[in-house]
Amino acid sequence: MPRGKRRSAAEMGPSEDDRHSSKRQRNAYQTSQSSRRYNKVDDAFSQKRCLTWFHEYTTPDDPNTLGPEGMEKFCEDIGVEPENVAMLVLAYKMGARQMGFFTQSEWLKGLTDLQCDTAGKVQCKLDYLRNLLNDPNAFKTIYRYAYDFARDKDQRSMDIETAKAMLQLLLGKHWPLYAQFAQFLEQSKYKVINKDQWCNILEFSRTISNDLTNYDVDGAWPVMLDEFVEWLRLLRSQSTIS
């Protein structure tokens, strides 16, 4: 009996090795897709995860408030100093009412807006927070917010030491006359700064030239700024004479 004609590999269909290879590829693809779906879920903002994270910084005595000790740990976790301007902008985003404290509702408001529920996500937003200060309108809003945020709530005005620290934080790098203004405050009689003075300091820094030639002494500036201009002009004249 004659033997049948041997079939080619193509006619016989995929070999065992080919079938195993195809199965491995399908499994790898499914694993990849599953991993992508997992990462997508993991990256999505979770209010529950956000609240769990908040309670890492609170105490059983006051579980709804993140206080100074918790704030220090929070700053360590996100890699910034408490005095960093990004923390002020973050507090502004939260609508925080008191420096050194975040309530649970403030935390949820700010971090939901930023879509952050982990330290890593906040770290990724730090440049965004700092860059908000480059927008003149946003800066003005944050500057005004800083006054009520930083002042002692028992007082209507801000004590001079707090004011100097906040002015350094907000204007120190951007206002060429800041160093002279800080020096003026050091030797002045002022122990507090009221809100009108605070707001006018920003306006002064934005509109008055460094040589003070466009300052109108008969304008509606607070007396504090009249005195600063007089003091600085005298200081400059003495330097010129000597």
Image (cartoon, rainbow, N blue to C red):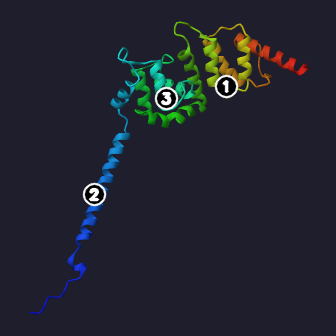
Judge whether residue 219 can be spotted in this image: no
Q: What is the number of the mark on residue 233?
A: none
Residue 90: x and y in percent read: 50, 27
State the residue in front, 138 or 157. Answer: 157
Residue picked out by circle 3: 76
Residue picked out by circle 2: 27
Residue beneath the point at 69% across and 12% down: 222
Residue 202: x and y in percent read: 65, 21
Callout 1, which amino acid? Gly
Sooner in the amino-acid sequence: mark 1 or mark 3: 3
Closer to the eye: label 3 or 2: 3
Callout 3, which amino acid? Glu
Q: CA distance from mark 1 to mark 2?
A: 59 Å
Element type at marker 3? helix
Closer to the eye: label 1 or 2: 2
Give the quadrant of residue 229.
Answer: top right
Residue 145: x and y in percent read: 55, 20
Callout 2, which amino acid? Asn
Can you name the residue that lies furthest to the right here?
A: 241
Element type at marker 2? helix
Give the quadrant of residue 150.
Answer: top right
Residue picked out by circle 1: 172
Quadrant that contains the N terminus: bottom left
